[in-house]
Image: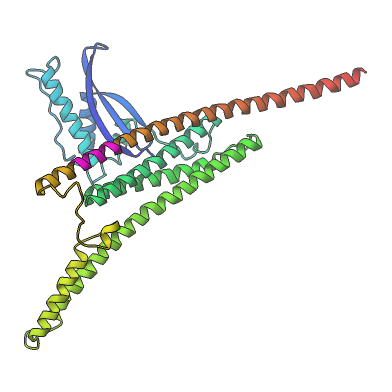
Amino acid sequence: MSEVIQSIFVRDCETRQQPKPHTVYKVDIHAAVRNWTIWKRYSEFKKLHEQLVALYPDHPPTSPFPSKSLFPPTFGDAQKTEDRRRGLEDYVRAILRDRDDRWRQTDFWRDFLAIPTRDTSTLTMYTSESWLEEYQDMAQAGREIRSLMNKRDTHNARNEISASHHCTVQAKKLLLTMASRLAHLDSGVQTGLSDGELRRRRDMLNTLKEEKDALAKLISTGRQDHDLLYTTSTTTGSKVAAAPMASSPQGTNWMDRKQLLGGESVQRHSTGSRAFGAAASSKLAKETEVTRGLDNEGIAQYQHQLMTEQDLQVEQFSAILNRQKQLGYAIGDELETQTQVLDELDRDVGRTQAKLKFANKRLGKIN
């Protein structure tokens, strides 16, 4: 199993003098639960392109590969180096975004990006520290999935279907990765731990499993609600469209047409508007003291001002939540440190008791 790459950036480059002067490009890779950086020369990008073309001669990467310029050379020219950097970034990002994943499934692509892979034969061989690190990664993945679900709901409210679908797909990928790694984490709980630490880690795993199940329900529930919404809309539209077809022109009198058109208008009125809160009981908006002396333009400006103030309040609230989240992370790290200290103290006490017991036996023999 390999990391799920979410984005790639080639943001910088630098000149190195060893073994001879050359330019290297900084490649930032953002995966599901971790980020890393690699440095690659232009020749390494070109080698990757040639390997992919040789492997799939009929299906080369969609983005053109930036060509090499000999006269004049690119080395030493800041503008040409920048153009090449942009071309290389567009090339690798096009491979990452393409729906055809044949290039991303190759070993050439994984080796080029230095994607860390996990050997299934060693997945369960965790140390005490590595197990906790893996658990923290899984907890972070769960938080990212919830963040994607919040973004999906925001996009749905704005009727941004494509962005909402993208968030759902990314959340499903993260959930699959989380489920697989969680299974290995469960089997990697060491039996040599103290009883208290073993129970604590089992409780941590159970909490993480419950979080995974809740996230799976959250993803599927969102999809079912979306499908239900479109099914209801389609059914309503079918009823409205089927109403004129129920009667023929020969057999329809003036009263039937009036009743038919009246039913259609009522149906449109019931499905074309939505009311929330107090507006549900009264269709007409009530005049307020603030809006009574305003014209249409003034009301629009007042509404824009209210929305700006609400956005500012949301940003302030988000900043407070971020500070609280960082504080929670710090508390969690401190608790982990204190737990490790207590475990070490427990082991030291056990060793001291064993030594005292041995010394008492020696004293008993001497007496």
Q: Where is residue 251, by image quadrant? A: bottom left
For the point 21% across and 50% down, the residue is 160
Give the image location of residue 196, x and y in percent: 64, 37
Quick check: is 332 in the magenta stretch? no
The reply, left or right, for residue 323 in relation to residue 281 is right
Quadrant in which the C terminus is drawn = top right
| Residue at screen point 25% across, 51% down | 157
Please provide percent x and percent y for residue 183.
49, 45
Q: Is residue 1 visible?
A: no
The magenta-colored residue range is 305-313
Q: Nearer the viewer, residue 125 or 51?
A: 125
In the image, 133 versus 37, the foreground residue is 133
Give the colour scheme of this rendering. Answer: rainbow
Q: Residue 347: tell me if it is visible.
A: yes
Compared to 339, does 261 lie above or below? below
User: Considering depth in this image, is 258 or 201 the residue closer to the camera?
Assistant: 258
The residue located at (41%, 49%) in the rendering is: 215
